[in-house]
Amino acid sequence: MTVTRHVVDVRNADGSRRRVQYRRAGSGPPVLLIHQSPRSSAEYLHLLDDWAADFTCFAPDTPGFGDSAPLPMAQPHVDDFADAVLAFMDALGLASAGAYGTHSGAITLITAAKRAPQRFSAIAANGYAVWTDAERTDFGSNYTPPFAPTAYGEHLAWLWHRIREQSWFFPWYATDDNHRLPRAHDNPHVIHATVLDVMAAGTSYGPGYAAMLQAPRDLPAPGAPTPPVMIMGRNGDPLQAHIDRLGPLPTGWQAHKLATDAEVEAAARGWLLRYPAPGDAVVTAPEDEGFVEVPGFGQLHWLGDPEAEILLLHAPGGAAELVARPRALTLDLPGHGLSDSPAEPPIALDSIVDVLVAAAARWPVTRIEGQGASARLAAMLANRLGLTHDPSPALRHGGWPDLTPDRHGSHLARAWSLARAEVCFAPWDAATAANARHFDPAELAPHRLHRRALAALRARHVPELLALIGD
């Protein structure tokens, strides 16, 4: 089943607008999938695929996580995240839906259901936290230290070990035998996925995560209206023990300790099938960002003015957000940014240009501009479309570092080294006086380097693309 990506603008409580990225799959009764912190909706790709046969699934990146904009307040409360779920439903035109959430996603949904019970046909919660006062005090002091980019990338070394060790100890900073977890691992690909999500969240990571760690037990009062709710916890999850902290449950609620993630997900699926919600989504998409469907490939992400004359192609290993400018349209290349990636490395430039042609033909562009090594792609695309292209200065492009995740996180240091060197030299991997690049010192601002490193880490098949482009 195809999982597609979308954007929608939602209205905050103060009347401002906020951009939300979300994934969608399937057909049938609407179901929301609310991820845990500090992840994104990417953690539900397997569920979107599995549940698409039974439901129309909507999995948003929650505020400040993934690629969704943060809430407008500096220190949001769990109530604010709950209201954001309701606002997302409003933006989709959903009067009601079933919902599934993991950890902080479960907390958010149960809070939302207490605030607006009529909006949910049923909720399945995988790990609902009932913190003690002592735990909230401890977490408030230690769990979410400030996370901000540093000039030389030290924050990424901290981040790698922070995420790796959260499978070793709970809380992650309680590094002693009494706090060990039973499913410790150092799988670099699992760690890397969470690290990328935290990098995408950036400075929103701390406040958003902290809101869930301070959340109270927020179950409906006896006799209060409530949708049916099933709370579950699997073996090895620290929150399984919190089922014993729940206390008396409202009528129509259940709580179960299960063995595996598969058992939890199967029980959740059955619960939501038992209480289907009516209705279809009716969405008004933003005018300055979206995803274009390319038959036989997937989706390309675009930014900017869809009526612009100029189409910008970022350099290999980059992203549309890094080159976006007024009165222009820009795409994430295949395998870059938020665009889908080809299953296999490209073996010919024509295969990439075919995808770009199918996308670009939908807009009234008259000129193509390629950044860096993408100048050749721009020329090929312009030729295929019968347009003009703006040639870039003849600059040698550099090679590409090995950014394959390893158990030590050393690939993060290589991505940061690339980001800094690109500002100072052209090509980046030839640091000589002859290759010095004139630059604005603002280009070395840590937050800009952070987004550049994230783009590099997200990119796929870059060495193969550069080899096809040639010098």
Image (spheres, rainbow, N blue to C red):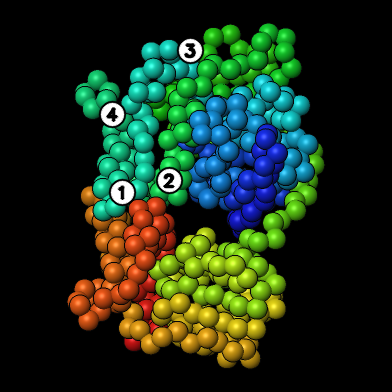
Label 4 to label 1: alpha-carbon separation: 21 Å
Q: Looking at the picture, how far across and down is residue 283, in whole percent?
A: 75, 51
Residue corresponding to mark 1: 150
Would you say the residues marked 4 and 2 are in contact, meaning their CB atoms lie under 8 Å apart?
Answer: no
Label 1 to label 3: alpha-carbon separation: 40 Å
Mark number for residue 173?
4
Pointer 2 local density, CA inside 10 Å: few below 14, some 14–19, many at least 20: many
Mark 4 vs 2, N-terminal side: 4
- Quarter of the view holding residue 223: top right
Residue corresponding to mark 3: 245
Mark 1 vs 2, N-terminal side: 1
Q: Nearer the viewer, residue 238 or 467?
A: 467
Label 1 to label 2: alpha-carbon separation: 12 Å
Residue corresponding to mark 2: 202
Residue at x 59% of width, y 67% of height: 326
Q: Nearer the viewer, mark 4 or mark 1?
A: 1
Looking at the rendered structure, the kind of residue marked 1 is Thr
Mark 1 vs 3, N-terminal side: 1
Residue at x 70% of width, y 39% of height: 15
Q: Is residue 378 above or below residue 419?
A: below
Looking at the rendered structure, the kind of residue marked 4 is Tyr
Q: Looking at the picture, how far across and down is residue 426, in whole percent?
A: 30, 76
Pointer 4 local density, CA inside 10 Å: few below 14, some 14–19, many at least 20: some
Q: Looking at the picture, how far across and down is residue 148, in whole percent?
A: 36, 44
Q: Nearer the viewer, residue 255 or 247?
A: 247
Say which quadrant the N terminus sits in: bottom right
Q: Nearer the viewer, residue 138 or 402?
A: 138
